[in-house]
Image: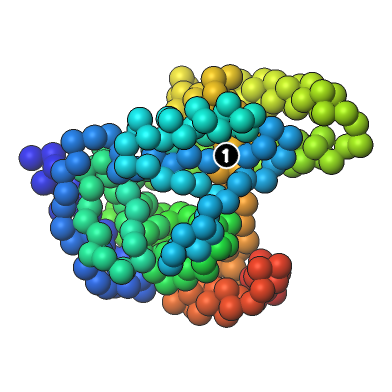
Amino acid sequence: AETRRQLLLAQDVRRYAVDALGLPDNRTFTTYTELNRPYLVWNVFTAPALSSELRTYCFPIAGCVPYRGYFSLAGAEREAASLRASGDDVSVGGVSAYSTLARLPDPIPSSLLRGGDGAVIGTIIHELAHQIVYVPGDTDFNESFAVAVETAGSRRYAQDHGQPASDKVASQARYRAVNALLLGTRAELAKVYALAVPDPEKLQQKRAVLSRARQKYAGLKADWNGYSGYDPWFSDDPNGLNNALLGSVAAYAEHVPTFLALLERLNGDFPALYAAVRTCAAKGVGERVTCLEGQ
């Protein structure tokens, strides 16, 4: 009964995304697949020990992206162990769903339902947004755009369906606070890595920066009434706070405020946003975000 309810929700969200948000109407997320595993894939992000930039991997169609995906946790962990042995920072994270940009009729995987209604709503809008604009090789632009559409679209869906906003507001406030902390930490580390000092000194300063970030997180968490969902990000285990994790967060969050600000200037007109983003996407990699700010 619960699976049926969530699948009905998914179809309602999909129809809303098409009718109210102007997202593509195709066979994406019109069928269901039971996976019998917690995630669809596991992504492995990696970065050098003294760099804030993620290593990239290049593929047909998708272009270059800052991760490699594995259909088994064991495969992801083998790759992660090999990368750590070479001295890299590594972060492994499960992915509940993705789409192939409408090249295949991607189903709703059972892993998506495990995340609850919020994940169903947000992910469907996010993945359909990728079909509007996708620039091969520019993950920061692509993901920030999709997260912005997901954020604003989910909010509008909740409003139009009379859903209570209190829990969502608290969740989004935590998300913004954590992202700001992580992006600030990454920027601080970039300055450390650029110093003209020996590597051992850089590593020492890196540890100090990460320690301060954990302390700041503890301060944030004190006001969250026991919520601990971000604890793994700030742990000191191999998948915890490191260059790879910080880079993965930046890829999905760095330019989201710019896209949301553009949508606000366009009075919440989603099709107008898509047209403006398409125009900017056609420009060079160094000009796209500047173009968004000038729209």
Residue at numbered disc 1: 46
Residue 131 higher or lower than 87, as above or below: below
Across and down, in percent, residue 65 comes to: 52, 55
Query: Closer to the camera, 221 or 238?
Result: 238
Q: What residue sits 50% from the left and 27% below the top?
A: 81
User: Disc count in the image?
Assistant: 1
Across and down, in percent, residue 270 comes to: 45, 72
Is residue 249 something that shows in the picture?
no
Q: What residue sits 36% from the left and 73% below the top?
A: 22
Residue placed farthest to the right in the image? 196
The amino acid type, in three-letter code, at marker 1 is Thr
Across and down, in percent, residue 165 comes to: 39, 45
> For residue 114, what is the image quadrant?
top left
Q: What residue sits 23% from the left and 48% below the top?
A: 109
Across and down, in percent, residue 215 comes to: 67, 20
Is 201 on the left or on the right of 67, as rendered?
A: right
Which element type, helix, strand or loop, lies under badge 1? strand
Q: What residue sits 23% from the left and 64% below the top?
A: 105
Classed neighbour count for the residue bearing mark 1: other residues with Cα under 10 Å, few (<14), some (14–19), many (≥20): many
Residue 184 higher or lower than 132, as above or below: above
Quarter of the figure that contains the N terminus: top left
Quarter of the figure that contains the C terminus: bottom right
Residue 8 higher or lower than 89, as above or below: below
